[in-house]
Image: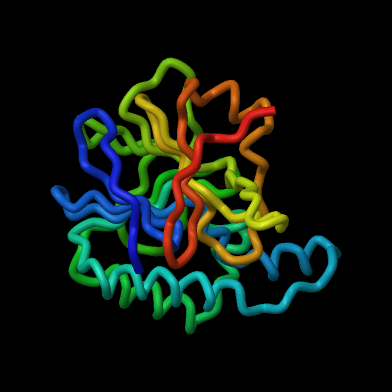
Amino acid sequence: MSGHVFTLAGAALEARGSGALWWPERGILAVSDLHLGRSERVARLGGALLPPYESAATLARLEAEIAALAPRSVVCLGDSFDDDAAGHALDEKARLWLTRLMAGRSWTWIAGNHDPGPPALGGSHLAELPAPPLTFRHIARRGASGEVSGHYHPKARLALGGRSLTRPCFLVDRKRVILPAFGAYTGGLDCRDPALTGLMQKGALAILTGPRPHPIPMPRR
């Protein structure tokens, strides 16, 4: 799978078509908002039943990126589970799958607003991860620089030959990158929403995910 290369705070990064972020110099692979256990949580709360395959689909995509890039470190940028109970309810197959993916590399769970991080699993559990010149956290902070975050599940719409195509996207400007949700069934927030246009500088890019990541000027209302 190809990627789009850009620079943030002097670090050369690659926005992968999967929605993962790759920092080759440090061997760091970052993913955000896996939301593992989403179907279990929705069913538990009495919502519409979702096919119970989202954890397997998400882990398969993550495994493919790990196999392709052989990262030394993986950073999960929060909301790795749909809530704390979903983390504890993860089935044995998924737990073993995660254990295999974590073996032989550093693994950091950043706390999100949906989950505090899975304490029963290995790895480091942090509020944020400084890795100068970058800082990895769940939710972007106004005034920050060199920031890698997630939380918002950004998506963008592209007009192609009279058709409209909507895809998850990275948002990139001179100070930060906001990752799309990596998990299946996660939905997204239109990048024209004030919550995102208020964070991103003029001239920001939206990098649409897919087999060929496609950068466009970040749409604004």
Looking at the rendering, in which quadrant would you find the N terminus? bottom left
| Residue at position x 60%, y 47% in the image | 155
Up/down of 101 relative to 5, above or below: below
Tell me the colour scheme of the image.
rainbow
From this viewpoint, is residue 26 visible?
A: yes
Residue 162 occupies which quadrant of the picture? Answer: bottom right
Q: Nearer the viewer, residue 149 or 108?
A: 149
Q: Is residue 104 left or right of residue 88?
A: left
* Residue lying at the far left of the rendered structure: 25
Closer to the camera in the image, 91 or 153: 153
**Residue at image coords 41%, 29%:** 173
Please provide percent x and percent y for residue 16. 37, 57
Hey, which residue is sitting farthest top in the picture?
Answer: 143
Residue at position x 55%, y 49% in the image:
115
Q: Position of residue 93 (x, y in %)?
A: 48, 84
Q: Residue furthest front?
A: 161
Q: Is residue 79 visible?
A: no
Residue 2 image position (x, y, % from top left): 33, 64
Image height of 127 relative to 153, above or below: above
Q: Residue at x 60, y 70 (%)?
A: 89
- Would you place residue 148 above or below residue 198 in this image? below
Q: Position of residue 59 (x, y in %)?
A: 46, 73
The one of 169 and 143 positioned closer to us in this rendering: 169
- Give the left or right position of residue 26, taking residue 97 as reference: left
Above or below: residue 17 compared with residue 104:
above
